[in-house]
Every structure is written in C-alpha cells, then in structure tokens.
Amino acid sequence: MDEWTGTVPQRKLGYQGPAVSCVCFGSLAISPLQGRVTAREGTEIFQYAVERGINWVDTAEIYHNYEQLAPVLRKYPEVRVVTKSYAVTAAEIKASVEKARKALERDTLDFFLLHEQESALTLKGHQAAWEELLELKERGIVRWIGISTHAAAGVRGGALLPGIDVIHPLLNYRGLGIIDGALPDMLAAIQFAAELRIGMYAMKVFGGGHLAQDPALAVRFVQSVHGVQAMALGMSSKDEVDYNLLLVNRRRIPEALRRKVLHRQRKLVIADWCQGCGRCVESCPQKALRLEGAVVKVREEECILCGYCGHACPHFCLKIV
C-alpha cells in the first residue's frame, strides 16, 4: 500500500493556539497562482489530505483560491484555515477579512496573518492594519493573528507585536530564501520568538524544490528546531499527500511512490510574449528575476517557486511547470 493510513500527530501551536496536525496543507500548490492543477482537482486533493488527517490549511488572499477550498471546509467545518493579506490600513484589513469570511463561508476566521513582513519597520507601516486585527480578535471575528515572513528581522519584529499568536517563517536547512541574512540569523530569531511562547509553523521546508533530493533531511531539520511546532507543505497531487505524511512520520516510503513524487522537477517558465514591463521583477521577494533588455530572466538558484511574480504580471507570462 502506498497510501498513508496512520494517525497524524497533533501539536499545540504556541501558548495560545489550538492543537493542529504537524503538517499544514499548503494550498499555494493547488492555487491558480501556480497553475499545477485545475480548480476541481485542487479541491479533490485538499479533501484527500483532510480525510487522511491534516486538519488545517494555509492560504492567502493573493492565492485566489478561497472558492476552491470552500467545498471541503463546508463538508469538514472542524478544519482550521490560515489566511493572509498585504493590507496596510484598517479599511483594507477589514475588507480582506470580510472577503475571506464570505468566500470561505465562515463567520469566524481561525487565523489571519499580515503577509510577508520584513522587519519592525514594515510592521510599523502596517500598524493600522495590526490594530484593526487586534480589534477583530477582541470581537471574536478572528481567533488568532500573526505574520508570515521570509526574514529573520521579520520574526524578531513580529515577536514583539502586542497580541501576536503565530509566526509563519521561512525555514530550511540551507537557509535558502532568507532575504536578510543566513540560517543562523533565522534560527536565533526563531529562538527569540519561542522564548515568548509564540506559535510557529515553517514554510519553504524544501527550499522551493532545491532541497527535494534529500527530503528526509529537510523535514528532520525543521522538526529539530525548538519552538517550531509544524510545517506547511505544498501538495498538488494525492501522491504528494501520502508521500509527505509518510515522510514527516518517518515511515517507509514505497519505491514506486518515491519515484512518482521525486521525479516531478519544476521550474519557473517565462513565456516568449513577455513585454519586459518589470512588474514581476519588482514583486519578487527573492530578487530572483532580472530584466535583460526587454526580456525577463530568472536566476534559478535563487527562485523558490513561490509564484508571486505570476500574480504581478499583467500578461500572464509566468508559470511554474
């Protein structure tokens, strides 16, 4: 049998948070932003993951996949949702929260995060949005609030926010994707947040695919970091769901399943109708894109396959395949 048939261990997310499965379903991989599967296929994969014990899902306003997740959430109301927004003002965060509540068919949202915060300085720029999240939390519209970040300074700055419950940091054993330093800086920041008993779940565990040749090492490293209770893993097939659950639970992975999952190499493709407007270059948090004349090029060693550049392109030129 290649399928996962066990019980997924649960972890308490920080001091204030709920018990969640040690794996969070990373829905970016099934979203239109990455375009790996159809909307219907993505819904089926998400439901498959839930039926195998994953009890929470990570999404974001930018992923444009609330409607893709809603049918499963309707069927399994106990599944918790993390969503995120780039909102800066109180009005913007209100609109983002209401959009999520309506599309996800939830009166109360489980987690709402400020998306991709870089430092105390960017958090200061989002102060009005944070204060509104505190108010929404007080009113019971949002249960837990926090930030996501690719930066060590983002973790440190976020840990000092009043009322913060959870931080979603980029973390992998080579430090790929950290935008303001190296792995030791991120580990020190995570330790600082852990001492404040803030819940943490990691992203980019496989470094955008760069570390996929030794996935067991990648997972074991994150599991060894004190203060990180869980990890979000992107899954765009039922095989990947089974593979990841076997992997994180240190179970034997059948060779046939290993071949099906590990042989799916992906990369960012830029279509030949690129207009060279540069919007994707500006949107890339990893600085992995550059303009050469009127054409955009990708530095593959820097790209972590987040797909955010595709959202910025007005001509739909970028796609992960």
Image (spheres, rainbow, N blue to C red):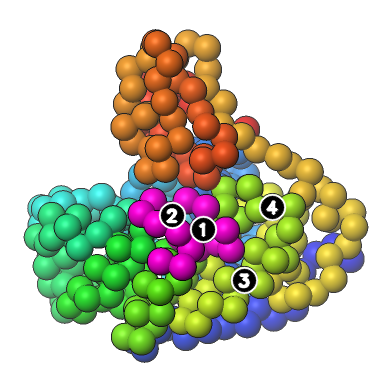
What distance separates the C-alpha of mark 2 from that of mark 1? 6 Å
Do residues under tags 3 and 2 come within 8 Å of each other at their CB atoms? Answer: no
Residue position marked by numbered label 3 in the rendering: 221
Residue range of the region highlighted in magenta in the rendering: 170-185
Q: Name the chief secondary structure element in magenta.
A: loop
Residue 109: in sight, yes or no? no
Q: Which of the pair 116/26 is nearer the observer? A: 116
Q: Position of residue 85 (x, y in %)?
A: 28, 53
Circle 1 SS class: loop
Disc 3 to disc 2, C-alpha distance:
16 Å
On the image, numbered disc 2 is attached to which residue? 178
Residue 212: mark: 4
Residue at 31% from the left image edge and 77% from the top image edge? 165
In front: mark 1 or mark 4? 1
Percent across and percent down for residue 157 are 24, 68
The quadrant the C terminus occupies is: top right
* In this rendering, position of residue 252 left or right of residue 65: right
Q: Quadrant of the N terminus?
A: bottom right
- Contact, mark 2 vs mark 1 (Cβ under 8 Å): yes
The secondary structure type at the circle numbered 2 is loop
| Label 3 – label 1 distance at C-alpha | 11 Å
Looking at the rendered structure, the kind of residue marked 2 is Ile
Please name the amino acid that badge 3 sits on.
Phe
| SS under mark 4 | loop
Q: Residue at x 56, y 26 (%)?
A: 269
* Residue 175 marker: 1
Residue kind at label 4, given as amino acid type: Ala
